[in-house]
Image (tube, helix red, strand yellow):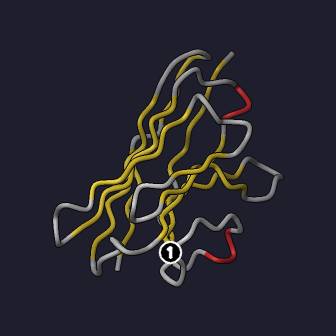
Amino acid sequence: VQLQASGGGLVQAGGSLRLSCTASGRTFRSSVMGWFRQAPGKEREFVAAITSGGTTDYSRSVQGRFTISRDSRDIAEDILYLQMTSLKPEDTAVYYCAAATEFRRIVYSHRLYNYWGQGTQVTVSS
């Protein structure tokens, strides 16, 4: 079972990035999937999540700027996306994708997610 995140990088404030996370090895199509981020010296925080039915929720700090989506059409893998626009320096962090296989509704604590990707660095310069 593997979650592989990609798409991070360095961008100027106001710019955009799209993160991708390919989940393979088992199907996550019935699971909640989400994105978290962790800045140096800070706790890992919830960014966004999506259910198998497409219900989404976002943290207040990214609401209106980030969009989460998923593609589960391929039976062999699920792909999770995070489209980030109007990026701010405070969005700088390592971003992680995750799956909560025991839940069908959105959950917000990182402790409830049992599969994790390796993280991808997003740096927003001012």
How many neighbours does mark 1 have within 10 angstroms: few (below 14), some (14-19), or many (20 or more)? Answer: some
Q: Amino acid at mark 1?
A: Arg
Above or below, 96 against 83 in this view is: below
Above or below, 102 against 16 in this view is: below
What's the residue at 80%, 58% (across, down)?
A: 43
Q: Nearer the viewer, residue 71 or 4?
A: 71
Q: Quadrant of residue 25?
A: bottom left
Q: Which residue is mark 1?
A: 104
Q: Is residue 5 left or right of residue 123?
A: left
- Helix or strand or loop: what does disc 1 sit on? loop
**How far from the left and from the top, in percent, is residue 77?**
24, 67
Q: Is residue 94 left or right of residue 18?
A: right
Outermost residue on the bottom side: it is 102
What's the residue at 56%, 38% (across, down)?
A: 122
Give the quarter of the figure containing the N terminus: bottom left
Give the quarter of the figure containing the C terminus: top right
What's the residue at 48%, 64% (across, down)?
A: 33
Above or below, 91 against 55 in this view is: above
What's the residue at 74%, 31% (across, down)?
A: 90
Q: Is residue 90 left or right of residue 102?
A: right
**How far from the left and from the top, in percent, is residue 123?**
60, 32
Above or below, 41 against 92 in this view is: below
**How far from the left and from the top, in percent, is residue 104?**
50, 75
